Image: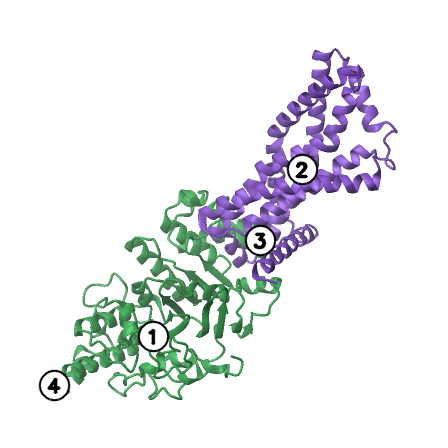
Amino acid sequence: MSDRPRDAGSGAGGGAPRDSTTSDASNGEHGGAPQDRVSEGTGISAQPTETGNLGPSPGGTDTATGSTVGKGGVGSEPNPPSEERSAGSAGGAGESGGPARPPRNAPPGSGGRRGKDVGPRAGAPTIADVQAPFRRQEDQGPKQKIAEVRKAIRGALSEDRGQTGEHEGVAVIELDHVSLAFDEPILQDVSFAAYEGETIVVVGESGTGKSTALKLILRLLVPDSGQVLIQGQDISHLSFDEALQVRQKMGMVFQGAALFDSMTVFENIAYPLREHTDLNEDEIEARVREKLEFVDLEPDRVMEQLPAELSGGMKKRVGIARGMANNPQIMLYDEPTSGLDPLTTGTITRLIMKLQRELDVTSVVVSHDIRSAFRMATRIALLAEKHIVFFGTPEEMAASENEYIRDFLGGF
Amino acid sequence: MNAAAKGKVLRIQEYFGLAWKALRFIFARPFYATDLVQQMDAIGVQSLGIVLLTGFFTGMVLALQSAVQLQTFGATMYIGRLVAASMIRELGPVLAGLMVAGRVGSGIAAQLGSMKVTEQIDALNTLGTDPIKKLVTPRVLAALVMLPVLTIINNMVGIMGGMIIASLMFGLPGGFYWRTVWEQIAADGFTLTYIPNDFIQGLIKPFVFGGIIAITSCYYGLGTTGGTEGVGLSTTRTVVATSITILIMDYFLTQVLLSVVGS
């Protein structure tokens, strides 16, 4: 592990995933053409190499390229998705939290799901642009036509989101070839990095170690090998007290909110302020009110309630308010939308995006909810069989022809 | 060494590690005074009823059984001495310890266990608070302070119960009963430089038992896994482990104290 170059995340290869993902091999050596290379004028991206997105195979090989992922694999014949599915996936991605994303309640035609936000927006390619490659190659087979359309959509979305995937400076959060085992391996050679203002969503099947990755970032767990770096500082070897200091930079929202039962909502949110700041009670109350209003709760109504008196969605919102009470630079979310109805799920997702947009915090979200993941993610990490098998933008994921990824997306 | 043995050694190490940290944090900032007061109330004040009841009836039954036996030798005047010695040296600390272990120990294990399975312990960690300092130390300190207090109350109530039986059923005057009690516990006086053996034994034991109850219940509570079923398991284990440990430690403490301070 230690013989691997640590700066896998530095530099390059457009299309973020490759620069900070899994192994050296994915860092360009085998990756083929750089990803998300944007064609001049048209905004249509070149075909990204799927191999660059893929980490080690579940079987344990370290070479990212050419390795198969799950049942499918790059080398295997992809399931040709229907045109509608492809467009729909990409459209869903387009709705995610990029700067140019239209508001959720925008009128039809101005953006939204099912690829509508590839529409005629200022500076964005038109439907005609998107369809151009398809028309030019009418004589090609249907598979090739579909591939061309997907390339076009991907390029349009990348333009629309204004994300080049290139990052400068030190990653805010970085897992560098991290492995962890208890009785059996949990994570093996996992690497990814989140840069300032990014929202990384970690998805994967149950039991693949997603929450464990969060606990490593929080240093609630220490990796067996590899490094966990927060703002460039390796936290794996910190003492307990030093780790407590580092954790103050982070806000964590737990799956079940993890509000303190014996405390009121006010006391829960005030807790980190009382512990770690010199604010007086008036200032603390003002801050608590501010945070409650941020998460769309009425302070006067909920402040004196106990967690047991709140609904699931309200608990999650109070959990977010508590997590952000200290104005952390990093927010971590463990299944923030699990167990919630679709409307509340949308509310929580919007809150996470609002937090990123307005406060520019760096976030890592562990989620099963692929729809929310596509909405809020800057990049998505897919964990399977203890490895990161994909790390890239939602568009790249939607465009992936890898069978496992397509199965995972389940037609989304 | 096989895995099971290693696991046991590891658990013992964890137990004493927890005890050491909890005791060390008594003298380290920040001090959670509010939590300490709350725990003193939960462990001490709220256990008062059960301790009073236990002590009173234990004293009465002790006087009754003793008097029946002493009557055979015409020695009922020694009821006070016997009840006092039994209550202060053994029954007071042990019964108070067992009662608190059952009531408070199980409560602590259940509370911390619930906090563990609902990720509240992890939440404390992520909010930059050491859970041992916040949760364990106040409970240990409260138990160390309150169990001796409860034991003293238990002893007093027990001796009073003995007096009621001695006076009402065996015709022993109250004043005489109290004089024999005093002779037993402070025959050679009571000064700052001389503390009678009964007091030493009677107060060291509950201090130790208090520590055992708090640390064992916190240990099982914080080690809870497996959801609500795990919480139930931790609670049961806590009560069993603390009760057995109290009884075993009582014997060894008595041996040590008798050899150190004499009978």
C-alpha span from label 3 to label 4: 66 Å
The kind of residue tagged 1 is Thr
Classed neighbour count for the residue bearing mark 4: other residues with Cα under 10 Å, few (<14), some (14–19), many (≥20): few
C-alpha span from label 3 to label 1: 38 Å
**Residue furthest to the left:** A139
Say whether marks 4 and 1 touch (CB < 8 Å).
no
The kind of residue tagged 3 is Pro
Query: What chain is the purple one?
Result: B
The reply to the same-chain question for discs 3 and 1 is no
* Chain letter of disc 1 in the image: A
Give residue B146's mark: 2
The kind of residue tagged 2 is Met
* Rendered image quadrant of residue A201: bottom left
Classify the position of the N terminus of chain B by image quarter.
Answer: bottom right
Say whether marks 3 and 2 touch (CB < 8 Å).
no
The vertical placement of B103 against A245, above or below, is above
Percent position of residue A380, x then y: 36, 71
C-alpha span from label 4 to label 1: 29 Å
C-alpha span from label 2 to label 1: 59 Å
